[in-house]
Amino acid sequence: MQLRTYQSESIFHLREGFANKHQRQVLTLPTGAGKTVVFCEMARMAHTKGTVTLILTDRTELFKQTIKSLNRVGITVEEISPNKKNIYDGATIYLGMVETLKRRKNLSIEPNLIIIDESHKGNFTSILEKYPDAKVIGATATPVGKHFFKYYQNIVQVIDVPELVSSGYLVKCKAYQMQDDFSDLETKSGEYTDYSLLSHFDKAVLYDGVIDWWNKYAFGLKTICFNVNIEHTIKTHQAFVAAGISSEYVTSKTPKEERDRILAAFTAGHFQVLNNCGILTTGYDEPTIGCVIMNRATKSLPLFLQCVGRGSRALPGILDGLNTNEQRLAAIASSAKPHFILLDFGMNHDRHGMWNEPRLWKLKEPKEKQETSAPVKKCGNEECECLVPISAKECSFCGYTFQISESTTKEGIMVEVTPKVPSGLVGRRISDLTIDQLIELEKSKAYKSTFIWRVIRSMGKDTIMYYAGIKGYKKGWIERQLDGMDDCEYTDYKLVG
Ligand SMILES: [Zn+2]
């Protein structure tokens, strides 16, 4: 299996975590970074050591393709599905849905490794309690939820959205936010109620607004639109149709055959806008989507990121066989989808910041307010008007330069505090730093340890051993990590203060 550098690194850090007695670990990779590939490789490696692995996922379709390739190299993968009475108990990899597993009380499998897909959902805790000794990898793009703190000891994050974009694995997002007043919304259990959302959004002026903005910013793009609930989904669909724009919708009530037909027609480009209300968030993968509409407000950062992430993939096949950041960025820039458009009608950017802002996830006890988000501002070029982080000095889409007075923060908005690069290193390129300077940079926390480690690795074995000595890593361990390590690649920055 051909892994990307950051995918190999994820595996490297997971193994490091297990070696350090972290029995349960969270693997966080953004949407579109290829979690499935990482899992299947972990399962394959476990198989070679005779370890029995259980993969829990709601997206069995996604896994079946990858698992076929494991079958081809002689690895038995047994699917635990509702209609299958007898489960072969001599397999090394089991694949099943959480709900099916819960119902199979007398299942006689003993996994040593459990891999959980979309672990933020938190519906698998009874399974963790059933196998208290198994090693666990809980994968998610958004590790938000109390259960993470309760069940896991370590979190592995080697890459986040900004770096995936700057490395040409995901496409840039050009975002627009409609200003609105949401003081009428009611909150229950941490999220706005459907009722108050519907009464806010169910207004002719807002249906018209969606159409106007789509015509202005996203005309002709294949679009996925996330609405409040079924009623709002149908009405938004009708608004598109009334405006002469081809549209379909799927909801939880859409029969499976009909849903399959609609999704296939969307992939084939037979209509323009696909409306839904939350069923196409996780596990739906359609790289040709060129525009995402958030036609709702949400307090949930995971929901916001999952919805937006649907637009972030590069067009199918264009990255195949490309090995450097420059090649990938050039391929994306010259493709029919150099970026995707995000139309936000819920002012979610004021709550959660930009989709592509750095997010460093930590396992910590939940507090009242856990998320701080960098606020956003509009590009001052009237022809552009897309959103940029409030700290931006220029717009990355049109090149507009902000005057200092324009970037002063709004009253009452929290500003993200970023760690500082040591002053002696400002102006230097990462690739010019000595090992000791890299360690100084790591200590400043201006760059993640995983990033520093990647740079160290690219400097060769002597540097790795020197670094390992300083960090107190055991020699045997580090030599194991050196086995089969690919060439390292990192984005070379000029350090700014
Ligand atoms: Zn601009």
Image: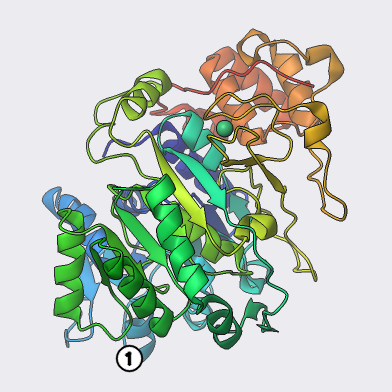
At horizontal 54% and vertical 36% (from top left) the residue drawn is 384
Locate the N terminus and report the quarter of the image it occupies: top left
Display colour scheme: rainbow
Indicate the quadrant containing the C terminus: top left, top right, bottom left or bottom right. top right
Please tell me which residue is depicted at 75% across the width and 55% down the height of the picture.
372
Could you tell me which secondary element the residue under label 1 belongs to? loop
Numbered circles on residues, count: 1
Can residue 443 be spotted in the picture?
Answer: yes
Residue wearing tag 1: 106
Asked if 292 appears above or below 181 in the picture, the reply is: above
Front-most of 469 and 295? 295
**Residue at 15% over, 48% down:** 73
| Neighbour tally class for label 1: few under 14, some 14-19, many 20 plus, Cα within 10 Å | few
Q: Position of residue 234 (x, y in %)?
A: 34, 79
Q: Nearer the viewer, residue 51 or 416?
A: 416
On whether ligand 1 comes within 8 Å of the CB at mark 1, the answer is no
Q: Quadrant of residue 254?
A: bottom left
Q: Where residue 18 appears, x then y in whole percent?
A: 55, 52
**Tag 1: residue type?**
Asn
* Residue 114 can be seen in this image: no
Residue 313 falls in image quadrant: top left
Image position of 59 (left or right of 483): left
Q: Quadrant of ligand 1?
A: top right
Of residues 229 and 179, which is closer to you in this image? 179
Image-based side of 194 in relation to 351, left or right = left
Q: Residue 454: percent from the left, percent from the top?
A: 56, 27
Residue 116 horizontal side relative to residue 198, left or right? left
Is 157 rendered above or below residue 200?
above
Residue drawn 72% across the image and 52% down it = 373
- Residue 243 is situated, as x and y percent measured from the top left of the image, at 30, 64
